[in-house]
Amino acid sequence: MKIQNVELVRASDHEEFFYIDSNDPVYEGDPVGIEWQEKDDSPFDFPPEEVFFTLFNNIYWKPEDEEE
């Protein structure tokens, strides 16, 4: 597998990422995790590339429409 396109993911204006220790929302533009793609070194386009996302240890995700 080959790692491609590593990107820093930042919080948007929607409150969906929060700090674990305080439950406060992450401010818009602050980093929340890393996203990257992996692709097999095969000369064929199968399997397709996979996208992975890992949150930083002090962040959790809770979608806006999720009820408590």
Image (cartoon, rainbow, N blue to C red):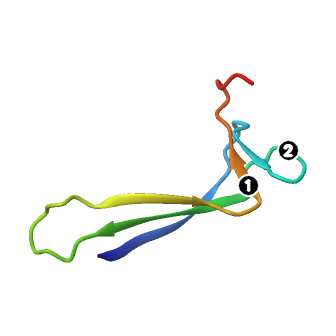
Q: Position of residue 64 (x, y in %)?
A: 67, 29
Q: Which residue is farthest right? A: 22
The quarter of the image holding the N terminus is: bottom left
Examine the rendered structure and indicate whether residue 64 appears above or below residue 59. above
Q: Amino acid at mark 1?
A: Ile
Circle nearer the N terminus (2, 1): 2
* Label 2 crowd bin: few (<14), some (14–19), many (20+), radius 10 Å: few
Examine the rendered structure and indicate whether residue 55 appears above or below residue 43. above
The numbered mark at residue 59 is 1
- At 68% across and 50% down in the image, what residue appears? 11
The quarter of the image holding the C terminus is: top right
Q: Return the residue nearer the eye: 30 or 55.
A: 55
Q: Quadrant of residue 52?
A: bottom left
Q: Helix, strand or loop at disc 2?
A: loop
Q: Amino acid at mark 2?
A: Asn
- At 74% across and 57% down in the image, what residue appears? 30
* Label 1 crowd bin: few (<14), some (14–19), many (20+), radius 10 Å: some
Report the residue marked by disc 2.
Answer: 23
- At 34% across and 68% down in the image, what residue appears? 38
Q: What number of labels is visible?
A: 2
Q: Position of residue 6 (x, y in %)?
A: 47, 70
Q: Return the residue nearer the eye: 14 or 68.
A: 68
Q: Which residue is farthest left? A: 44
Q: Position of residue 10 (x, y in %)?
A: 65, 55
Q: Helix, strand or loop at disc 1?
A: strand
- At 64% across and 34% down in the image, what residue appears? 63
Q: Quadrant of residue 21?
A: bottom right
Q: Are marks 2 and 1 in contact (CB under 8 Å)?
A: no
In space, the residues marked 2 and 1 are separated at their CA atoms by: 9 Å
Q: Which residue is farthest front? A: 68
